[in-house]
Image (cartoon, helix red, strand yellow):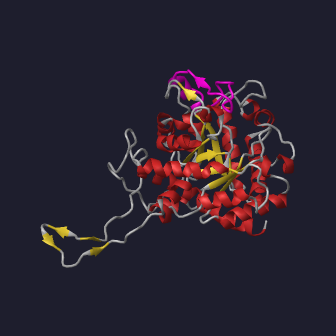
């Protein structure tokens, strides 16, 4: 455990238990500041741009100016990089070239996969090197679900699927299992886990979702997914609820194609959205957007790149970090390259963009910078995303964007 775990607990505590202290700083609207068409602007104030403010009352000039502290945000490139969470293909050691590359770019987070895992000590060494070389606090994430989708299967061995857990155990059993899993992740230096799955599915066990889903019943799925999320928090790890607005109505694999669902919105609200709504209401801090396109939301556009889909999520009351599924998956990457997909995601409402190929991080960052400089992407939208990602990492968003950001804390 050593320094990795000790430092991690402080960062996770800052995210999960002290978020409301940041919220107490208050938020201020930004009016029409650079907001793009259809985007209402962030919920915090922009950086101060004047050195002094002369107060006046009833036409009388005060004798002395009131000093206002200037805040200079981080560079545009640094703010853009903080919205990126990238994978580390073929990377297992602290001296691998990709470690230097992603930390030089300044990414906000990394995703560990099974390809990064050889042993417990090896993972700790890799994570320690990433944190030490990062200029700011780093989000270290994993994809450790119960069942067949596991980052650390080589270390943990087999585990029952979500479907089996819900069929054979109680919510408390699932919470206990999640707590044990989180404690292992915490020991390895991981602070964010891409689970639980809140999708509804009762189809073949090996489908895209399949037995990764707790149930096809909204209430059952919500109850068990919430129990799993709470177990993650119990063990010191931030849970990520996925894949909004739901993947269970299609068996097409978004790794290879672009799934589309034609279900009316009122039907989705009564079924697929219910588990997400319940977890959001309980204070879920992070939600992952899936790549399924919904005709009732925005025809032909994956939810991960759809402004109406993000608006739907926010309308549920969600105030946390919205992150995309990997933009390297076929549903996105067969239509848009990494740079374009990153810009489209942030413009639509994403706070974090996940890309499994860290060698594309520089390209993704530079595409965001160019989009802001050309006016395609409102700078305020980028700042909102960067601030939320900074808060998730346990960083002070004000040191990055000159504005506070608060994340919800799970009950």
Observer-nearest of 250 and 334: 334
Residue 305 position within the rendered picture, expressed as x and y whole percent measured from the top left? 53, 37
To which quarter of the image does residue 158 belong?
top right
Instruction: Please say whether residue 249 is one of the residues in the magenta stretch.
Output: yes
Identified at 50% across, 40% down, the residue is: 344
Residue 180 appears in the picture as rendered: yes
Q: Is residue 193 above or below residue 297?
A: below
Tell me: 381 left or right of 304: left
| Magenta highlight: main SS | loop
Observer-nearest of 209 and 101: 101
Residue 410 appears in the picture as rendered: no
Tell me: 29 left or right of 211: left
**Rendered-image quadrant of the N terminus:** bottom right
Tell me: 156 left or right of 127: right
Residue 411 position within the rendered picture, expressed as x and y whole percent measured from the top left? 60, 50
Question: Which region is colored magenta?
Answer: 246-273
Q: Is residue 287 above or below residue 55?
A: above
Q: Tally the marks.
A: 0
Tell me: 55 left or right of 102: left
Residue 26 position within the rendered picture, expressed as x and y whole percent measured from the top left? 42, 59
Identified at 59% across, 42% down, the residue is: 338
Kindly give the residue lying farthest to the left in the view shown: 59
Identified at 48% across, 62% down, the residue is: 75
Instruction: Please say whether residue 361 is one of the residues in the magenta stretch.
Output: no
Identified at 77% across, 58% down, the residue is: 188
Residue 288 position within the rendered picture, expressed as x and y whole percent measured from the top left? 60, 42
């Amino acid at each position: 455990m050593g320094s990795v775990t000790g430092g991690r607990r402080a960062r996770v505590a800052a995210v999960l238990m002290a978020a409301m202290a940041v919220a107490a700083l208050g938020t201020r609207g930004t009016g029409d500041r650079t907001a793009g068409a259809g985007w209402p602007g962030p919920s915090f104030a922009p950086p101060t741009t004047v050195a002094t403010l002369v107060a006046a009352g009833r036409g009388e000039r005060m004798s002395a100016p009131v000093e206002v502290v200037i805040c200079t945000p981080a560079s545009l490139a640094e703010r853009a990089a903080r919205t990126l969470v990238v994978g580390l293909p073929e990377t297992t050691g602290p001296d691998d070239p990709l470690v230097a590359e992603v930390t030089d770019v300044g990414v906000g987070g990394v995703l560990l996969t099974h390809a990064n895992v050889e042993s417990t000590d090896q993972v700790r060494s890799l994570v320690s090197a990433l944190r030490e070389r990062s200029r700011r606090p780093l989000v270290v994430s994993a994809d450790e679900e119960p069942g067949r989708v596991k980052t650390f299967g080589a270390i943990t061995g087999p585990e029952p699927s979500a479907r089996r857990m819900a069929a054979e155990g109680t919510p408390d059993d699932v919470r206990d299992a999640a707590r044990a899993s989180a404690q292992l992740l915490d020991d390895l230096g991981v602070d964010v886990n891409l689970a639980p799955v809140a999708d509804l599915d009762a189809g073949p066990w090996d489908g895209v979702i399949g037995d990764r889903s707790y149930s096809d019943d909204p209430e059952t799925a919500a109850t068990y997914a919430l129990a799993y999320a709470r177990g993650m928090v119990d063990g010191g790890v931030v849970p990520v609820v996925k894949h909004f607005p739901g993947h269970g109505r299609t068996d097409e694999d978004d790794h290879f194609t672009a799934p589309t669902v034609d279900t009316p919105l009122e039907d989705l609200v009564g079924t697929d959205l219910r588990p997400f709504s319940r977890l959001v209401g309980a204070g879920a801090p992070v939600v992952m957007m899936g790549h399924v396109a919904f005709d009732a939301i925005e025809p032909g556009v994956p939810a991960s790149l759809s402004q109406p889909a993000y608006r739907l999520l926010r309308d549920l009351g969600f105030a946390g970090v919205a992150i995309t599924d990997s933009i390297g998956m076929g549903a996105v990457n067969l239509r848009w390259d990494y740079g374009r997909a990153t810009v489209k995601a942030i413009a639509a409402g994403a706070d974090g963009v996940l890309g499994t190929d860290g060698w594309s991080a520089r390209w993704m960052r530079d595409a965001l910078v160019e989009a802001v400089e050309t006016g395609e992407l409102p700078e305020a939208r980028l700042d909102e995303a960067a601030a939320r990602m900074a808060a998730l990492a346990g960083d002070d968003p004000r040191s990055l964007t000159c504005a506070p950001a608060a994340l919800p804390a799970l009950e």
